Image (tube, rainbow, N blue to C red):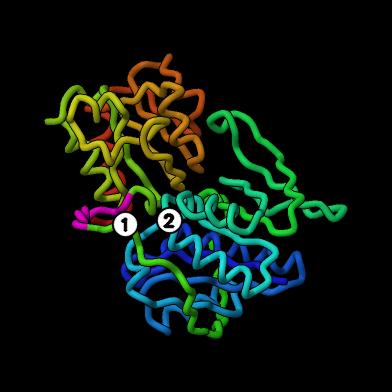
Amino acid sequence: MSVIIFADQSEGHIKKAALEALSYGAALARSLQTTATAVVLGPISNDVAAGLGKFGVSKVLLASSDAFTHLDGQVFAEAIAQAATAENAQVVVFPHNPDGKSVAPRVAVRLKAGLVTGAIDLPDLSGGGFVVRKNVFSGKAFAYVTIKSPIKVISLNPNSFHVQEGDGKAEVVAFQPTVAAPRVKVTAVNKVSGEVPLSEAEIVVSGGRGLKGPENWGLVEDLAKVLGAATACSRPVADAHWRPHHEHVGQTGLTIRPNLYIAIGISGAIQHLAGVNGSKVIVVINKDPEAPFFKAADYGIVGDAFEVVPKFTEAVKKLKGI
């Protein structure tokens, strides 16, 4: 019996959400008094693979074939299901990021396993049960889901479990699953360079229609730059083509869970909150004291963004000695 964790990687680097999943899986393995094994699909170095021992896994199954360079949900699911069978896995853990969302349900089907997506806590194992807590109704309530199947599949919401780093080193074992040729052909990869990816960002500065036009977006970018943050926007801003749609956060855009979310000129409609209310700390800047976002904020500033944000940025610069 064991816990295996999908260590999602990109260009040889393990993604932050996967490091959280590794720490979560290792903690779960300790509770179950078993071992934790990572599965890495795609070309990464042996040193990087062995280094995953710092996050609590004792073994890494490394399938470094080029067949795993780009995500094909069917191929990845088949490989991870084979790894779970080979390791006699009791639980399979995924990060609840785009890759994990694509692969976890397929693995659950192959293993005839119960599946809970978007877990936010370690399972409650009292009384021999296996109860997983997750957010529902856009984060307004919790659901407690019991999995009774012999094998369980869980995906972990980003920023729900702290990365726990020690000084261990994992055994790296070459893994050669038997999978079909990928049916997904990647013809081009367009990368956004020089920016912090929204899905990985610890801090996000976001703007709404209160900025009045794209010509004023420098306010958001200046503050994001001094904070080392990613930039985001509300849906009306993306729909008006002030900003690209890949920056749109909310129910119909990206769901993010940064440590700090700063909303500038965003009223806080429920659709927007659904995508950001998992943030650890929310700061709202809005001149309308009745803006609904203030009810969800940890800190709020009632004032004109064009006066408040430049002073905010200068204060951060002074604090950092920039």
Q: Residue at x 61, y 61 (%)?
A: 92
| Mark 1 residue crowding within 10 angstroms, few (<14) / some (14–19) / many (20+) | few
Tell me whether circle 2 and circle 1 mark residues in contact (CB < 8 Å).
Answer: yes
Q: What label sits on residue 73 in the rendered view? A: 2
Residue nearest the viewer, comparing 137 with 269: 137
Q: Position of residue 307 (x, y in %)?
A: 24, 28
Residue nearest the viewer, comparing 100 with 22: 100
Q: Secondary structure at mark 1?
A: loop
Q: Residue at x 51, y 43 (%)?
A: 280
Q: Position of residue 26 (x, y in %)?
A: 63, 68
| Residue 294 belongs to the span the image colors magenta | no
Badge 2 amino acid: Gly
Q: Position of residue 225 (x, y in %)?
A: 24, 49
Q: Quadrant of residue 30?
A: bottom right
Q: Quadrant of residue 64?
A: bottom left
Give the magenta-colored segment's residue range. 187-197
Q: Residue at x 19, y 25 (%)?
A: 240
| Residue 189 belongs to the span the image colors magenta | yes
Residue nearest the viewer, comparing 126 with 155: 155
Residue nearest the viewer, comparing 314 with 152: 152
Q: Secondary structure at mark 2?
A: helix
Identify the residue under disc 1. 184
Q: What label sits on residue 71 in the rendered view? A: none
Position of 204 with respect to 188 (left or right) is right
64 w.r.t. 32: above or below: below
- Looking at the rendered image, the quarter that the C terminus falls into is bottom left
- Whether residue 193 is visible here, answered yes or no, is no
Badge 1 amino acid: Val
| Mark 2 residue crowding within 10 angstroms, few (<14) / some (14–19) / many (20+) | many
The chief SS type of the magenta part is loop
